Image: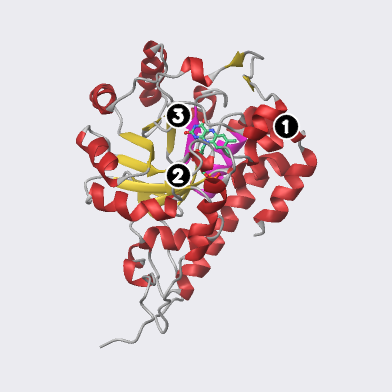
């Protein structure tokens, strides 16, 4: 799998403004770059001489079986990446046994995605709108539609300052041609009390996405969240925020086993996935690579990306001597200073 080539192919096909919208981050794109660098900086201590004839990459996310710990992150504007974007992504997820988290904002119809047959779980991501009735309605419908969890994204108190989008005069055009401004639509008064309010009223588990600290993660779990996603929105919101790989340990400690912890941002290799799991994540989400796959070859393109990740996770597990996902533990990570003389 070469995701840089895939991105180059997608770039060649796309309108420059839309490429920038997907690829870009906030301000000087430091956090965007650091997300991937932080996974690359970490080092593994592989185990050898384990029988790794058969590797099982499958795991569960909130109790539902998935073929590997790599899930598809929610992304707006999939309908502009391919006319059939969200449905093609959902089909690819089902074909590869991966969890797809459908993003409701500007990404297509939750009902159409729900109608794609298959056993892999799907989740629905929502923003809490200033017009709360809209969010409540979408959440109420989601359980009937067969979504397994609601994901509320909380790192958008303001839209990030995306310089490329400002230069390009980018606008959020919905599939019906309407322009939407997130700064006007989203509820900026959201607190942990609102998370508790939604958790009480949501018939399916609630996951909070966009958490960067252990204390916040603990407060989300106290408010009723069944999971948290360590995320900085792919470096698109607060530039200068720490990389998700560097935030993960704090969040895992804050949650203390009371909920599942997921992470996204800059995950581009199977070995990054193994590092995330070794730090205590239950699974990871990938964003942009899925968009590149969708742009280049629709459903087949997304399938290629997900199969590529599965192959790399399988190989990295074998080379780390882990035959099952639950054998990926913290001892596989080299702590800073571990290589100093002992005793
Ligand atoms: C084009 C694009 C659109 C996105 N739209 C949403 C969205 O609607 N809701 C959301 O919670 N996150 C959204 N995100 C953030 C992703 O869910 C995810 O956190 C991020 O892309 C992960 O980082 P990665 O792209 O480096 O894998 C978006 C990301 C991109 C690149």
Q: CA distance from mark 3 to mark 2?
A: 13 Å
**Contact, mark 1 vs mark 3 (Cβ under 8 Å):** no
Quadrant for the N terminus, please: bottom right
Residue for point 58% across, 32% down: 86
Image position of 338 with respect to 262: above or below: below
Image quadrant assignment for residue 155: top left
| Magenta region, residue range | 87-103
Q: Comparing marks 1 and 2, which lies closer to the viewer?
A: 2
Which residue ends up furthest to the right in the rendered image?
12
Element type at mark 3:
loop
The answer to if 20 sits in the magenta stretch is no
Q: Is mark 3 within 8 Å of ligand 1?
A: yes
Q: CA distance from mark 1 to mark 3?
A: 22 Å
Residue beneath disc 1: 17
Question: Is 120 situated left or right of 162 in this image?
Answer: left
Specify the label residue 241 is tagged with: 2
Q: Residues within 10 Å of mark 2 (few under 14, many from 20)?
A: some
Element type at mark 1:
helix
Q: CA distance from mark 1 to mark 2?
A: 25 Å
Image position of 41 with respect to 342: above or below: above
Residue 308 % position (x, y): 60, 57
Image quadrant assignment for residue 228: top left
Residue beneath disc 3: 156
């Amino acid at each position: 799998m070469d995701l840089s080539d895939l991105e180059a192919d997608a770039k060649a096909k796309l309108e420059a403004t839309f490429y920038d919208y997907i690829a870009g981050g906030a301000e000087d794109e430091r956090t965007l770059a650091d997300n991937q660098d932080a996974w690359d900086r970490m080092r593994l201590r592989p185990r050898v001489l384990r029988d790794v004839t058969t590797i099982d990459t499958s795991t569960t996310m909130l109790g539902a079986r998935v073929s590997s710990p790599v899930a598809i992150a929610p992304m707006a504007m999939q309908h502009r990446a391919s006319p059939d974007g969200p449905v093609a992504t959902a089909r690819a997820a089902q074909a590869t046994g991966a969890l797809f988290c459908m993003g409701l904002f500007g990404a297509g119809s939750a009902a159409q995605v729900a109608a794609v047959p298959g056993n892999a779980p799907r989740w629905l991501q929502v923003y809490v709108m200033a017009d709360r009735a809209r969010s409540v309605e979408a959440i109420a419908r989601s359980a009937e539609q067969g979504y397994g969890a609601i994901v509320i994204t909380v790192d958008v108190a303001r839209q990030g300052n995306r310089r490329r989008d400002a230069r390009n005069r980018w606008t959020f055009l919905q599939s019906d041609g309407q322009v939407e401004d997130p700064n006007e639509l989203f509820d900026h008064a959201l607190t942990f009390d609102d998370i508790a309010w939604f958790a009480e009223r949501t018939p399916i588990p609630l996951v909070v996405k966009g958490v960067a600290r252990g204390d916040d993660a603990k407060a989300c779990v106290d408010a009723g969240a069944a999971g948290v996603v360590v995320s900085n929105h792919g470096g698109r919101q607060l530039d200068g925020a720490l990389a998700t790989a560097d935030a993960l340990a704090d969040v895992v400690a804050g949650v203390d086993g009371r909920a599942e912890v997921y992470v996204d941002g800059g995950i581009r290799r199977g070995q990054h996935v193994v590092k995330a799991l070794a730090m205590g994540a239950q699974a990871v989400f990938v964003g942009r690579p899925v968009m590149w796959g969708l742009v280049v070859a629709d459903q087949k393109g997304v399938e290629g990306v997900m199969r590529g990740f599965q192959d790399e996770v399988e190989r990295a597990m074998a080379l780390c001597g882990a035959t099952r996902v639950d054998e990926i533990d913290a001892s596989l990570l080299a702590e800073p200073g571990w290589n100093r003389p002992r005793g």
